[in-house]
Amino acid sequence: MHHRLTVSPSQPVRRAGLGLLAAAVLIGTVAATPAAAVGTAPTGILATAASTTPSALSAPAPAGDGFRVLPYLMEPSAESVDLVWFSETDEPGTVVVDYPGEGAGPVTLVSTPEHQPLLGYTDAELSQEIEGLEKGSWLKGAENYKHRVTIPGLSPGAEIQYTVTQGAETHESTFTAGPGSDWDELRIVAFSDTETEPYGRTEHREWEQSPVNGYTEDLLERPGEGSAWAEKFGHATRYGSFTLNYPLDQDTALKENLKHIEAADPDLMMIAGDLAQGSGYQPAWDEFFGYFAGENGDLASRVPVLTALGNWETFAAINGGYGTAEDQSPAVISRNKYHSYFVRTGDGTDQDNQQYRGSYYRTDHGPVTILTLDSTNGIPDEDTGTGELSGEVFSGDDSNLTEENLSTDTQGEFTAESYTKAFKDVFPGTTDADVDLPNFNEGTAQWAWAQEQLKDAQEKDQVVLVQFHHAAYSNGVHGTPPNHEHADNQSGVAMRAYTPMFEEYGVSAVISGHDEMFERSWVDSDGDGKGFHSFDVGVAADGLRGEQLAQNEEGDYEPIRFNTSSEWMAAADAPETWTERDGVLQLEDGGLHYGHLQIDLKHVGESTEVTLSPVYVFPQLDSEYNLIGTERRVYDDVTTFTVDRDGTDETATPEQPADFTDNAPGSQFYAPVRWLQLEGISTGYADGSYRKFDDISRGESVAFLYRYLDGTAGADEDFSDVTDQSSFYDEISWATAEGIATGYTDGTFRTTEDVTRGEFVSFLYRASGAEATAPEELDFPDVDADSAHAEAIAWAASRDVVNGYEDGTFRPHQPIHRAEVATVLNHVDTAATE
């Protein structure tokens, strides 16, 4: 269980600069830019599934005398935070800030409204029709006025109450200032790909499933074609196969996800891009703020939000997509609509290059430094459509990726040159030096800035996190580069150029999205045992994608698995368990779901303990598949590591064997697997790996017990599939002689079959000796009292040797993987010495 952290005010100074220039030159831009400029969504993705057939224009809602967007927190620092909100009239608003402490007293701040003409509705938006919704019902008022004030004079850890009055409406909220050096615990929540739009209120996305590990063994499968599930939620075809749609529409998914995030009481929210389903589509932004600072929730009024630009932040949806090579204005307008909401100009930005308007920036929050990078464009430009590539085409996995064939760009929708031209067209009077699109490659301003910030953070002993949108390490649909045999035109592989820099300066984790599949990779490119975790957390509320598949010679689809650094994927490592309940098939657990990454930091002496928990929102349905509610669950990939004051972990001493190549310090299950190695229980494989997440066979598991207990070969055993020439012969004969393991009624031992969680615990129970007795009560609903392994499971649980899952189950029939065996044996050893 995690616990939460439990002035001299002065008048704020408003930040001016390019933001005011943009507001000035944007007058009339929407009318001057063709709303129906030619452009399309990425292949296989629709900007909106709604009809865009020209029809009568809907009227925007009458201007409200209050908030269009509720106040939200931006640019938090140790001394101040900015408060931003929007109205539909030009009336100034007021903020009353109550500082804690005797004699502090309230301070009143007054906003200066700034008209945002770029946020007005286009004719295409006013004429849009969306299936399932009353035409125009999602529209707000025609005008947008931005208000931004700085709340100064903050003290570390202080709880600040504030009240904002805008016209006839008042909004009250609180926030906690960033911690000081005496911090105890912090919590950050990270997610990506909210991709909001009005159509999300009714759309159910396709729900992909692993073709190689879709189900737990010997259990029921998903409902099929013609089922009540398919009729209620719909279905799609993916890779030529029937695919169910997910039971939550995108609107419900985001509401439920945010409900669980709010209950976790985070200190910061990180959103790694693709906030709206097309930044150039105003109703998408109206929807976004409805969840975070509006009619559906106001979490951003209490928790600062750190956002990154994604590919959708350069996409205008029905207003021209990405544009064309001749007219890239939709991309320019889209980026600058994002800036209207999230422009940053504070000390955390690149002060020497303010034309980028805070597209990349630094946030310091107590012991944590978060760098947000802009991954939306690289140079030289690449495009699979034109064949403009930076490296030779290659095949296979990323072991064939070299410095020479590393890609340089993350999208082929526009070039730096075409964007620059369009920027100057949209903003008359500007020059190349004013263009807001930074490139990310070595030699660019962003690259030099990132290196400088990382060096500074390391020198200050900070825990460093980095976020950007395009996942550099992924097995998803964008996981292969544009110069690969199975090319992708929006791949994040080019961002791997930063890997040596991240390793040099001790980055702990990189947060991205884009592939929408929830994946964790451990990256250690130089093999020194020090690296970083790389996440795709693009499961906030939009797509639920599986791995990228390709057809083999037989015509069957199988995973490409380009990313050899991958250690865990929800789509592949969380097989589904279905049961029949009340006459219908129901999912009990497993599968890919919407969720977020919870990052917990705990102050431990001179170090920081970091725990990364992949949280998912599990839908609970009744017998008619109506939503009862959702449950917060955590995937079986919680990773905990310690960051020392120098930003590194201790490495093995020379007298000890080197770590397994796939068990680097800081990686999940590092400690128990390292213990197993040092105890000589396992020497791993010939390639130096341990293969933590592989299932373990009956023969291997008995061998582990044999070595742990210093067993000696027993009497000969007459198993039809075990001879004195067989692998694990001595170990199996010992285990059967000791009564630890028995064969099957057909006279076999089945050495190579996977051992289940229940079976392995029974092996342990029998090995524990005659004095072992099991308690009468069982705490797991999926373990019957009269089942074969019930007594062993109850015994092991009572001694904290094993634990169940977040949903209270034990899953005795699920195969146990090699890292879990190491963990269980380590727990047994610890309990024996206490």
Image (cartoon, rainbow, N blue to C red):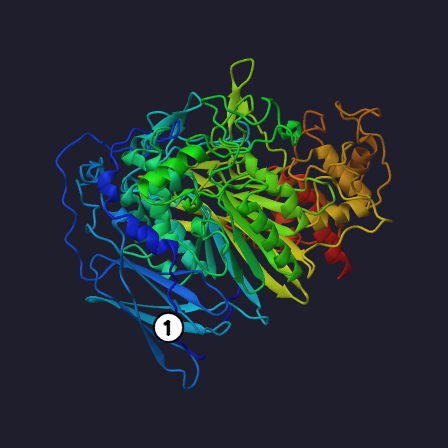
Q: Quadrant of residue 455?
A: bottom right
Q: Position of residue 340 (x, y in %)?
A: 34, 51
Residue lying furthest left in this view?
A: 56
Q: Nearer the viewer, residue 178 or 316?
A: 316
Q: Extreme top residue here?
A: 554
**On the picture, is 521 further left or further right than 588?**
right
Question: Could you tell whether 645 is left or right of 683 in the image?
Answer: left
- Does residue 558 appear left or right of residue 425 in this picture? right
> What residue is shown with label 1?
161
Residue 457: x and y, percent?
Answer: 61, 58
- Residue drawn at x 54%, y 29% is 481
User: Compared with residue 311, is residue 119 higher up or lower down, i.e. above or below?
Assistant: below
Q: Residues within 10 Å of mark 1 (few under 14, many from 20)?
A: some
SS at mark 1 in the image: strand
In which quadrant will I find the C terminus?
A: bottom right
When the figure is inspected, residue 690 is found, relative to residue 511, above or below; the finding is above
At a point 39% along the width and 57% down the height, the residue shown is 17
- Residue 435 position, x and y percent, is 42, 44
Residue found at the very far bottom of the displayed protein:
103
Q: Quadrant of residue 569?
A: top right
Residue 161 in view of the camera:
yes
Inspect this view and state whether residue 785 appears.
no
Nearest to the observer: residue 577 or residue 50 = 50
Q: Residue at x 30, y 30 (%)?
A: 231
Q: Residue 382: image x %, image y %? A: 50, 29
Q: Quadrant of the N terminus?
A: bottom right
* Type of amino acid at the residue the image marks with label 1: Gln
Q: So how many labels did they put on this image?
A: 1
Front one among 174 and 709: 174
